[in-house]
Amino acid sequence: MKTRLGFVSNSSSSSFIVSKNSLTEEQIEALHDVCLLPIGEYRDEWNLNFRGSIISGMTYMDNGGGEDGLFYWLKINGYPMGAFEWDDD
């Protein structure tokens, strides 16, 4: 039997960073508002951090893909998708 000490990931987190300079003030406000809403099947909330000129977001459940996820919402609402850097576990 194998044992593991330390943090164990369930491989279901997702995060992003984006420069505020890549977004309009309206897009920043809308992103803030939508990330506070439950999104997708897991009804999971995104944790946003506004630091200087960078916005970073993280969730424990990967609801970034599919038509009920944040990635889809950004795409259909005209966000500059090339400005976002995503990291999925």
Image (spheres, rainbow, N blue to C red):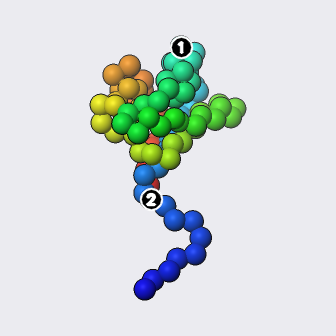
Give the residue displayed 47% in from the left and 37% down from the top: 44
Picture coordinates of residue 58, whole percent (x, y): 54, 42
Label 1 close to label 2 by CB (< 8 Å):
no
Quarter of the view holding residue 68? top left
Label 1: which residue? 26
Picture coordinates of residue 12, whole percent (x, y): 42, 52
Q: How many marks?
A: 2
Q: Nearer the viewer, residue 69 or 17?
A: 69
Quarter holding the N terminus?
Answer: bottom left
Q: Is residue 2 left or right of residue 48?
A: left
Q: Which of labels 1 and 2 is toward the front? A: 2
Label 2: which residue? 10
Q: Marks 1/2: CA distance?
A: 35 Å
> Residue reaching furthest bottom?
1
Q: Secondary structure at mark 2?
A: loop
> Residue reaching furthest top?
26
Give the residue displayed 53% in from the left and 13% down from the top: 26
Q: Is residue 72 left or right of residue 23?
A: left
Quarter holding the C terminus?
Answer: bottom left
Picture coordinates of residue 21, whole percent (x, y): 57, 25
For badge 2, the amino acid type reads Asn
Q: Nearer the viewer, residue 34 or 86?
A: 34
Q: Secondary structure at mark 1?
A: helix
Give the residue displayed 41% in from the left and 39% down from the top: 42
> What crowding class fits label 2: few (fewer than 14 Cα within 10 Å), some (14-19), or many (20 or more)?
few
For badge 1, the amino acid type reads Glu
Quarter of the view holding residue 53? top right
Q: Nearer the viewer, residue 10 or 22?
A: 10
Vertical order, 79 against 17 (above or below):
above
Give the residue displayed 56% in from the left and 24% down from the top: 32
Q: Is residue 14 left or right of residue 47?
A: left
> What crowding class fits label 1: few (fewer than 14 Cα within 10 Å), some (14-19), or many (20 or more)?
few
